Structure formats: structure tokens, C-alpha cells
Amino acid sequence: MNSSAKRLLKDYKELQASNLGTISAKPVSEQNLYEWHANILAPEDNPYHGICLHLVLHFTLDYPMKPPTVELKTMIRRPHVYNSWLCLDLLQTHYSSEPYSGWSTSYSITSILLQLQSFLLGREESDVEQKMYWLAPSLIKEAIDNSRVHVCRCGHDMRKNIVHPKGEDWLDYIPEGCTLAKSSGKTKVHTSNKQSAKSFKRKAKAKFALDVLPEEVLLHILKYLDVVEVNRVRTVSSKFRSASNSPILMYSTQMQCFHSKVSFEEDILGVGINMEYTPKKILQNITSPMDLVSKSAYQQGLRKGVWGETFKYWIPIYINKSHADTMVKDEFEKAVQHCYDYEFVSYRTSHVSTLCLDILCKLMSSMVVEIMKGKVHASLRALEYYCHFHRLLIHAVLKYKNLQGQIDNKIKQFLSDESYRLKSVVPNLGEFLPLLSVSSYHWDDVKHMVVQESLDRNAMWIYKKHGYSATLKDQWECSQVGSRLLMFHSYFLTKVVPYGKPLSEIALAYDIRYGRPTTKMQSEMQNNIFHIQSIDSYQGYLAYMSLIVSDVRQLLMLSMDNMFRKKYLVTSGKTHRPSGVKNIQIRSALPSNNGDKVPKTVESTLRTRERSYQVKVDKNEEREGKSKRNFNRFDVLVNSTD
């Protein structure tokens, strides 16, 4: 069976499970899966209630790469409807980079019919006069009357009250005609309450027996039921109701290829990626459309995401141990080698474990960029894939025994000597920080040096834009994007991956949730993003990192000195004059690795002083260059913690 036929069968199964009520469709015959006939009804609160729109959908062997051709067989006068042809971009063979526009291979027959129902029977015409015209009672009556006499070769004959294909119970939607669907089971007739109780006695026992099953077993059973069946078993017992409401059950049903609709139990699932290189052939960045793609779909030529974003390569993701053991195995290593070999021969000399580490850290860094863009839906998706890649990173560390030592040694060098923190050694701090999540080190061990190095690197952009004349506000605006990314890394490394927790435990927690973050984690992450985006000063940034410094201005002057000393920027004909600032250190406001909070007396003083400090900031910004701030909120914190 070819891929298009398999996909059509998947769509049919989904349509049956959806139980839409006012929509029914099926292939014209078992021998012809490429022609479908459908009927669409109007809900009771719709002006067209009583109509039965008959449509024919023609699919090709290219489905779902190409949309079906849709013929409207019932005459209805509506905007963008021309006899049997519908002018709808959903049905046009083109891709749009704009989300939710044009055809997408993620669409199924169910989603197509739902959109057609809204398109043909909706009341969303913005122009009042147009709305009054198209919803005129005479036009509605004409359309309903036309549908009542329509005859089709598939067996649909409204003159004889024969609706084909037909929903389970359409009598409520078609007042005049259509016999009720036959019951799927035999009816029991009880002559007394006693007989009734006896008849259902065995069911009660079965219910009690199933209640002793662990929830993990119930979830595994429910996974094989469709939506309608899951809704039915919710009434069996409180334990079934709890299991059917579990987000883990929802996660399992969502883990499927958007294109072929195969699940992670049927094929290897992964994501498409793009690799961006510098002119010097150095891998700089890796991005992903963040859509689940099966290996088979990729091998068959799929190179576009849900909304048309192109990708060149594909790597599998780690969903759970079962998926990895039976499906992934060595596929990740093969996929990674293909990505690098395809571009540049120089990478072929690297051990596969090093390549795995490189690609995953770059992907995790890329996901943080997407997360911090702040758009809720996109941020949640990026967090989800960040967790998938983190699980894969744990898998790589546990599989390749040399990686743990390699990672710990890299962090140890970063801590021991400034030369190991330079851009030539650590080109991207965002790609270095994910290593902490699988290392023997903690965020508190490195945060002082990471923040200082970040300030030194940001000084280059500040100087390029403002020279030496930048105000505090100017400098923050040049640094805030990178600073916000570091704040998220800080959040993930302290809240999501607690220090000291074994990697095997973190991996197990991921596997139970199919590699996805918990609902609580998503909610807390969103709140954290909003908090990070509200931070608009170096003072707020350092406070978020639980760091203190005696003078922010002098710290930034020192960073400018460091930037020139490290040769991050070489100016022709100009010599940088050192500021003379010394002994300005970033210190931790918290004892390292213990997670204790700042003493309440310090927090209280900090809040009290912040209001008066902000007033002084506003006034001083107005006369920038004429006077210096004589107060810094972090002086309070320094004095309180000494």
C-alpha cells in the first residue's frame, strides 16, 4: 500500500473517532480510497439548519503533498462559491510562509471538512450589507430546498430520504426525512428492577476488579481507544475518570508525524533541521521548524514543515525508552553524521559523540531564542522541543561514557583560567550552558564568570553603536537580548534540572511524559518569561541572577577594558585608554549550591530602597553626563550580606 493510501486510512480512522455529529464522509467504495463523498449539516442554532450539503473530494497519489479537489454538489449561493467550485486558499496547491494560510500537509480530512463547514455555513461576513444579502431568508430557503432534492450516484437520494454517507443520529439536524440509524447492539428488556440488577451484576464486579490496576496500566489500555470510547469509560469509576483526564494520555495521542499521521509506535519520529555555516565553513547555528516528522516521510522527500518552513536534514528525537530501544537505536548517530558529512569533510574526523554534543547544544540554544521571543504558543512549542533535545543529550551522555569526563573537563577549564572563556574557545555561551545540565557542576559554580564574560562580549556591540558615550540605558538596550537568554538558562538549570538529581531520574521523568514538560512547568515557564521581559536594567538583571556588585557603572567600564584586552574588537588608528577600574567583582548573593533564599531583611531593604533608587535613576537619566549616581541599590545588598 502506498503512502497516500495509508494516510487516507489514517484520516478515515481519525474522522470516525472524532464523532463530529454534523459531518459524515467515507470513500465511495473499498476499492477506491481516492474519491470520498461527504455530507455537511448545519447545527440547530445556524440559519441553514435543515440543509444537507453534499460534496465530493478527489484525492491524488500526491496526497497529502497536494490538497484534494472539492466539488460542491448542492447548489448554494454564498461568497466565493461559484457553482461547484470553491475559492478557498486551503484547497490551493501552494505553500505560504504565513502561519495558518494556504495548504498544509498537516491537514486531515477531518480538518478540511470542519473548515468547509465554517466556510459554507458560517456567518462571519464583516460587511453588514453583504451579511444581510447572503443570509437573506429567501436565499437560505432556496439552498435548503435544493439540498432536499439532490441525487448522487453514490446512493445519496434526498427525494427518498436516503442520506449517504450518514452520521449515527441525524434526525435532529434534518427535520423532514431520514430514518434513524440502527442500534449497534441488542436491547435488553427487564420485567422488574430485580431482573435488571441481576443482569448488570457482573459488570459491577468487573468494574471493581479493574480499579485495582495501576494507573500506568490503565493509561496503556486507554491509549488504544478512540475519543468516543475514552469518554465512555470515564463513567466506569473514579480511577478510570482520573486516568482518562491525565495529560499523559493526551501526550501519547499527539506524538505523531504531522504529515503521515503515523505514531511513535509505528515509525521513528524526529524533527527537520537546518544548519547555518559561516563563510569560513564553521557551523554557526542550527534551527528547526519544530514539527514532528517521521523517518519515512523524510525519506519520501518531505522538506517542508506544517506552515511551509523548509528544512534540509532530519534527526530523531527521544520520546521514551521504548521508542528509543525499538525504533531509534543507532538512528540518531547516523542522522548526525549525515548532517555533518553532507556539508564539510572536516567534521568527519570528529568522533560521533562529539558531533552529537555539538548538534544538541546548538539546538537547545536555538530553542531558548525561540522561547524568549515571548509568543505564547511558539514559546511552549520551543520549550517542548528543548526538553526533547535535553532528553537526547542525557541519552548521549549515558551512552557514550567518554562524554561525561569531556563535559566536566570543559567546565573545569572554563572555571580555572580566563583563556578557556575566550570566544575562540567558547564561541557561544548559549551553547556552553546546556552542558551544565548533564555535568557534575552547578549553575552557581559558573554564573559569576558567565555573566562577566557575557558583559565583556556585549561591550563590543555597545562600543560599535555608541563608542564611549553610551548611557546606562543605551548599554542595557544593546545587552538585553543576550542577558535575557542567560536568565532563561539560569531558570532552567536551577528550577527544571535541580542540582544533584541523578540523570537517570531526570530521564525517567521525561520518559513518563513522552519527553514533554509538565503542565505546571509550562505555566511557570510562561510566568518566568513575562518576568524576564519586564526586567529593564542591569540592576534587575543582576538581581535575577542573585548576583551583587558595588558599582554597575564601574563594572561596565571594566567590561569595556576587558573587551579590548581580549581583542574582541580591534580598532584601526585608535588606542583604547583603560579606565583604571580595578577590584570590581561580581559576587553571589546566595551561598553556592544550597538554594537558600536571600535573608528576608535583605529582601525587605532591597524592596524599600528600589523605589527611591528608581526615582534617582529617572532624574539622573535626564541630566546624564552632568552628575553621577551617588547610590546603587546593590550597595545595600553588599552591606547587608557582609
Image (cartoon, helix red, strand yellow):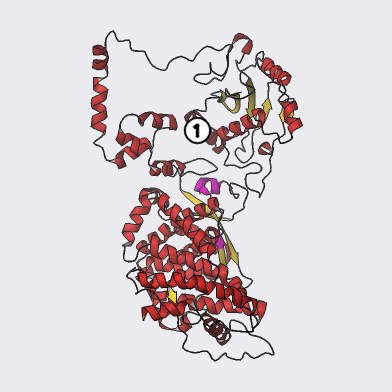
The amino acid beneath tag 1 is: Glu
Tell me the residue at 62%/53% (across/down). 310
The quarter of the picture where residue 68 lies is: top right
Judging depth in this view, the residue of 510 and 473 nearest the camera is: 473
Q: In this view, does 533 lie above or below 477?
A: above
Q: Is residue 617 left or right of residue 323?
A: right
The quarter of the picture where residue 458 lies is: bottom right
| Disc 1 packing (10 Å; few <14; some 14–19; many ≥20) | some
**Residue 521 part of the magenta-drawn span:** no
Element under disc 1: helix
Residue 427 in sight here? no
Residue 523 coordinates in the image, percent (x, y): 45, 52
**Residue 289 part of the magenta-drawn span:** yes
Residue 580 coordinates in the image, percent (x, y): 54, 92
Judging depth in this view, the residue of 582 and 442 nearest the camera is: 582
Q: Is residue 307 above or below residue 231?
A: below
Judging depth in this view, the residue of 206 and 522 nearest the camera is: 522
Question: In the picture, which quadrant includes the C terminus?
Answer: bottom left
Q: In this view, does 359 lie to the left or right of 238?
A: right
Q: Is residue 94 left or right of residue 499?
A: right
Q: Give the range drawn in magenta.
A: 286-306
Residue 182 in sight here? yes
Q: Is residue 354 above or below residue 266?
A: below
Where does label 1 land, which residue?
14
Residue 249 coordinates in the image, percent (x, y): 39, 41
Tell me the residue at 49%/31% (across/down). 18
Tell me the residue at 36%/61% (across/down). 399
Judging depth in this view, the residue of 176 and 297 nearest the camera is: 176
What count of labels does the image hold? 1
Q: In this view, does 360 lie above or below 569?
A: above
Residue 8 coordinates in the image, percent (x, y): 55, 33
